[in-house]
């Protein structure tokens, strides 16, 4: 009996030994399959070919070189740029679905009564990307020629002046609001469904004013198809060295730039976030990206801001800056 029990005991160990052997055999395969082992989707809240999309495609292509996997851009548009973050907040937190977004991450909580995500709680932060200046433009035959003349004209003709924007949540809406406040007038605001139709309306002379990103306005300024009243940043920009700032034109303290960050769903493993941050940092040194950003008038943020902490700090500061102002302006949707 003793020897039979001994035999059974020996057999009882076989499956365990087999399991151990299988795990040991699989270990190299597991180790050889680290993140990322398949393409990563970079979700963009706005249309293909638009200002955010062109930044995303340039940076995403360069990130894929470091990650060794394709970064596929997916445009999930709608609801003023809130559909995309809602989608990413609910996506699997595995590092394969990430988001690029602009100022809208800081402004949406004040613009939408019902928001299904919390920008400050539902994401991991990969890093900031680049800042894009904006330009205050007029239709070609608008009478004023300078920012100072525009301010006077706006104050004297406030009921007649149309100001276009790319819709609720667009940075052109924010810039327009800031401009109205700075000048002390309420324009006849005309929202369009995106940057392209708003710009077309300005080029076609159907609207008087539009404040939008250099990403889309530089070619039209260069071609003399619009009147350029000033850049929205405190300092002049490299892409338009001869263009005055709106501050120089008399709007003291006027400061508006579009900033971008890359986000992952809350709970994404730290190792994956660290790899995404490293890939972002490498992308922002890539000569092709540097050149593309220069051509768009964009400025890559300093290395210290291309970090999770850098993005989180910016998001918090911009939320604190914009949300009270938007609430006071009553620019709210459901
Ligand atoms: C876009 O990419 O279409 C713009 O960034 C939208 C906007 O003006 O906010």
Image (cartoon, rainbow, N blue to C red):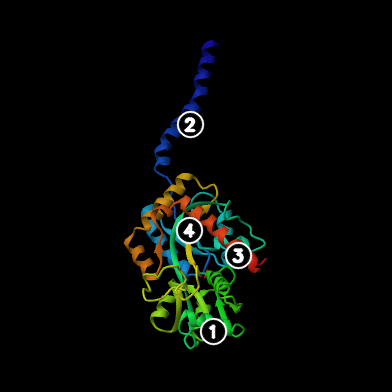
* Residue holding disc 4: 261
SS of the residue under disc 1: helix
* Residue holding disc 1: 153
Does residue 298 appear left or right of residue 169 in this picture? left
Q: Is residue 68 visible?
A: no
Q: CA distance from mark 1 to mark 2?
A: 81 Å
Q: CA distance from mark 2 to mark 3?
A: 62 Å
Ranked by sequence position, the earlier of labels 1 and 2 is: 2
Ranked by sequence position, the earlier of labels 4 and 1 is: 1
Vertical side of 148 occupied by 238: above or below? above
From the top left corner, tell me how far across and down residue 279 is, in percent.
39, 53
Comparing labels 4 and 1, the label whose residue is closer to the camera: 1
* Ligand 1 is within 8 Å of the C-beta of the residue at disc 3: no
Badge 1 crowding class, 10 Å Cα cut-off, few under 14, some 14 to 19, many 20 or more, is some
Q: CA distance from mark 2 to mark 4?
A: 45 Å
SS of the residue under disc 4: strand
Badge 2 crowding class, 10 Å Cα cut-off, few under 14, some 14 to 19, many 20 or more, is few
* Residue holding disc 3: 325
Does residue 328 appear left or right of residue 73 in this picture? right
Question: Mark 2 touching mark 3, by CB under 8 A?
Answer: no
Comparing labels 3 and 4, the label whose residue is closer to the camera: 3
Comparing labels 1 and 2, the label whose residue is closer to the camera: 1
Comparing labels 2 and 4, the label whose residue is closer to the camera: 4
Checking the image for residue 145, the label placed there is none
From the top left corner, tell me how far across and down residue 51 is, in percent.
46, 69
Vertical side of 283 occupied by 198: above or below? below
Badge 3 crowding class, 10 Å Cα cut-off, few under 14, some 14 to 19, many 20 or more, is some
Q: Residue at x 34, y 59 (%)?
A: 286
* Residue holding disc 2: 19
Question: Mark 4 touching mark 1, by CB under 8 A?
Answer: no
């Amino acid at each position: 009996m003793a020897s039979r029990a001994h035999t059974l005991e020996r057999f009882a160990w076989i499956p365990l030994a087999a399991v151990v052997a299988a795990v040991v055999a699989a270990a190299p395969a597991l180790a050889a399959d680290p993140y990322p082992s398949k393409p990563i989707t970079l979700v963009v809240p706005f249309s293909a070919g638009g200002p955010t999309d062109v930044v995303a495609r340039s940076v995403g292509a360069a990130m894929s070189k470091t990650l060794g996997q394709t970064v596929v851009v997916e445009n999930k548009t709608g609801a003023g740029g809130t559909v995309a973050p809602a989608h990413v907040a609910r996506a699997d937190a595995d590092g394969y679905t990430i988001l690029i977004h602009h100022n809208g991450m800081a402004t949406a909580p004040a613009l939408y009564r019902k928001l299904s995500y919390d920008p400050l709680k539902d994401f991991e932060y990969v890093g900031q990307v680049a800042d894009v200046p904006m330009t205050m433009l007029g239709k070609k035959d608008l009478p004023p020629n300078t920012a100072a003349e525009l301010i006077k004209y706006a104050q004297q003709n406030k009921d007649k002046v149309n100001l276009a924007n790319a819709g609720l949540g667009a940075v052109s809406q924010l810039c327009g609001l800031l401009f109205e406040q700075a000048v002390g007038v309420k324009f006849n605001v005309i929202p369009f469904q995106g940057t392209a139709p708003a710009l077309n309306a300005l080029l076609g002379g159907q609207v008087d004013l539009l404040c939008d990103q250099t990403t889309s306005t530089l070619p039209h300024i260069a071609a003399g198809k619009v009147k350029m009243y000033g850049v929205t940043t405190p300092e002049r920009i490299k892409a338009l060295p001869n263009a005055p700032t709106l501050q120089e034109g008399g709007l003291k303290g006027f400061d508006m730039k579009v900033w971008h960050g890359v986000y992952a769903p809350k709970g994404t493993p730290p190792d994956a976030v660290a790899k995404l941050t490293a890939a972002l940092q490498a992308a922002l040194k890539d000569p092709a990206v540097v050149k593309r950003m220069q051509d768009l008038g964009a400025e890559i943020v300093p290395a210290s801001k291309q970090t999770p902490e850098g993005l989180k700090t910016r998001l918090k500061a911009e939320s604190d800056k914009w949300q009270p102002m938007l609430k006071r302006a009553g620019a709210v949707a459901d």
